[in-house]
Amino acid sequence: MQETNVISVETVNFDEQIESYLRNYKLTGIPIEVSFRDLVPDLYKPDRYTHLIHSYPAKLLMHIPYFFLNNNMFSKKGELILDCFSGSGTVMLEAILAERNAIGADANPLARLISKVKVHQYSYDSLTNHFEDLLSNIKLRPDGISPNVPNVNFWFLPNITSQLKVIFNAISLIEQTEIRDFFLVCFSNCVKKVSLADPRVSVPVKLNPDRYKQSHPLYEESKRKLDGLNYLNVTEKFIEIVNDNIQRFKLLGQKRLNTYTASIISNDARNLTTDIGSSEKMLDGSVSLIISSPPYAGAQKYIRSSSLNLGWLNMVYDECTLKDLDAQNIGRENYKKSEYVNFRATGIVEADILLQKIYKINPLRAHIAGNYLREMREAFKEAYRVLKSGGYIVLVVGNNQVCGLEFETQQYLKLILEDLGMTTVLRLIDDIQSYGLMTKRNKTANVITREWVLVLKK
């Protein structure tokens, strides 16, 4: 495991820097260009506490929530922070490290599992003791109901599949939910590494050395991986992942204070409840600060990128359940033709002018982008409801292109929030250096090149 970057949040406070930004923006109204990596240079190592317990596409740069949490301008210690598109829990982890309480919501069950585990307070001794028991059970090769992974023979060699089943069945025997979830996250992080999927692409694509000339370095690299899978010991790979993650939680336990909690409370940003599966709504005005990086319109296939993991975790059973899960996601791409026979306005004048142009080129892409804005309005209504008066929303978002035309996502989302009653107090721009789902998706949707950070006050 890489050396974990541990710094003391108590010694860092960005009040002065934030005051300067707010003052300058109030005077000029011009977005300010920044580099969050330069603003928070101490976070140069990505392996910070439990951030890397599981890979996840398009992770939010941890420097951003760190910057907005370690000050007294937007929230105070002990207050409640919400990430309504929480992904793998970056904001939630940084919130508890900054001595705040945190809650999150996400439509992807894999993301919810990772987040739940990432911020849980585990005992080092308990994890190591359960790990010893688990390894003993793996050696016994327990029987059980194995996951029904869609297209398992396409994505996994038979010897890999049989080894994964043994590990999964052994984990399933663990009675304590929190402990079982920890090992399921470790197991899930192992899955794609031992599959036939190309590790360089977020959405599963089968690894094929013949895509490259034999002189190309990726030809040899791909061939080596495929050859290695024939004799790979999956248990050894799993043990390596578990040991790394136990060490991460050991460091988190040394840093974390028992006072502060974090939890996932909903699977839908449009319906923020007190707990997963509950019908009880969150209280109005109960959140001090919202920090979130919402999905993009047709730009990121979170469910597809998680499909192998979801199958092995028994969270999806076939292509139909995968599609059902995808349909719950804002920004999805799959729609029936009947849904976009006619153009539908969003109510945002600037966006509708552009969407009408896009509709003439590609009705589906216009519908994807338009429905994204309509659903984001519903999510923002709910965010506005739970945010206290005087509270802030920090939104991390990028523009992208649709059918060769620039789709100013950040501008449209800003207008939605302002229409709900928010006031924009700051806009920052940061160039992206790396992004988890920056693969070019198709001819009518382009990659995102810059991050906009919008700060709005209720």
Image (cartoon, rainbow, N blue to C red):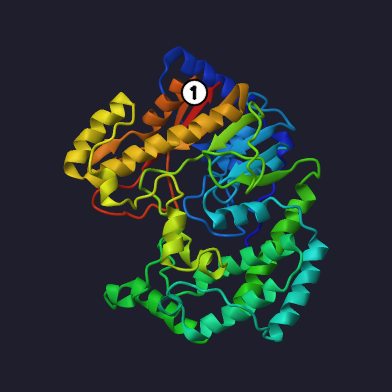
Q: Residue at x 67, y 56 (%)?
A: 117
SS type, badge 1: strand
Tell me where residue 174 appears, x and y as whole percent.
Answer: 74, 70
Question: Quarter holding the N terminus?
Answer: bottom right
Nearer the observer, 433 or 195? 195
Nearer the observer, 23 or 320? 320
Relative to residue 353, is residue 179 depicted above or below?
Answer: below
Classify residue 176 as left or right of residue 296: right
* Residue 452 visible to the viewer: no
Classify residue 44 as left or right of residue 12: left
Tell me where residue 382 appears, x and y as whole percent.
Answer: 54, 32
Q: Residue at x 66, y 74 (%)?
A: 239
Query: Which residue in the protein does label 1 denote?
Result: 426
Q: Residue at x 58, y 82 (%)?
A: 163
Question: Quarter holding the C terminus?
Answer: top right
Residue sitting farthest toward the top:
27
Q: Residue at x 60, y 48 (%)?
A: 89
Identity of the amino acid at label 1?
Answer: Leu
Residue 346 appears in which quarter of the rendering? top left
Tell me where residue 215 appears, x and y as whole percent.
Answer: 29, 76
Relative to residue 179, is residue 418 depicted above or below?
Answer: above
Residue 241 appears in which quarter of the rendering? bottom right
Relative to residue 328, is residue 391 depicted above or below?
Answer: above
Classify residue 122 as left or right of residue 308: right
Residue sitting farthest toward the left:
360
Tell me where residue 299 appears, x and y as whole percent.
Answer: 37, 48
* Residue 59 visible to the viewer: yes
